[in-house]
Image: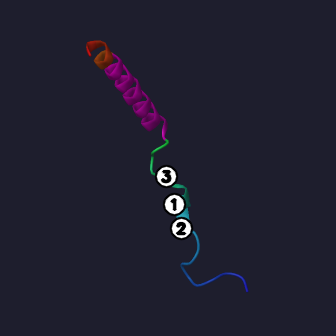
Amino acid sequence: MHGGAAGSGAPKNNHNALKHGFYSREEVRKRRLIKLMLDDFRKTLSEIE
C-alpha cells in the first residue's frame, strides 16, 4: 500500500519551506534598531523628567 490519491502529499517546489519572514535577517535588524531607538527615547525622557 504505497502512494495515495492523486494530488495528495507535499506540494511541489518545496512550498512547505516557505516562511513568514519574521526571522529574516532584515526583520531582525529592523527590530534591533527599533529597540535601540526606544531605549534612547526612554533614556532621554528620564533625563527630562
**Image-quadrant location for residue 40:** top left
Tell which of 12 and 42 is nearer to you.
Answer: 42
Residue, disc 3: 19
Please report the residue visible at 59 percent of the width from the left and 74 percent of the height from the top.
9
| Labels 2, 3: front one | 3
Q: Position of residue 39 (x, y in %)?
A: 38, 23
Q: Judge the density around disc 1: few (<14), some (14-19), many (≥20) Cα neighbours within 10 Å.
A: few
Q: CA distance from mark 2 to mark 3?
A: 15 Å
Question: On residue 1, which mark appears?
Answer: none
Residue, disc 1: 15
Mark 1 touching mark 2, by CB under 8 A? yes
Q: Is residue 21 left or right of residue 5?
A: left
Q: Judge the density around disc 2: few (<14), some (14-19), many (≥20) Cα neighbours within 10 Å.
A: few
Please report the residue visible at 57 percent of the width from the left and 69 percent of the height from the top.
10
Q: Position of residue 32 (x, y in %)?
A: 44, 29
Residue type at the position of mark 3:
Lys
Residue type at the position of mark 2:
Pro
Q: Position of residue 34 (x, y in %)?
A: 37, 29
Tell which of 23 and 1 is nearer to you.
Answer: 23
Residue, disc 2: 11
Q: Is residue 21 left or right of residue 41?
A: right
Residue at disc 2, secondary structure: loop
Q: State the extent of the magenta-drawn residues as a range.
A: 24-43
Looking at the image, is 11 positioned above or below residue 37?
below
Please report the residue visible at 48 percent of the width from the left and 40 percent of the height from the top.
24
Mark 3 touching mark 1, by CB under 8 A? no
Colouring = rainbow
Residue at disc 3, secondary structure: loop
Residue found farthest to the front:
49
Q: How many marks?
A: 3
Looking at the image, is 39 positioned above or below residue 10?
above
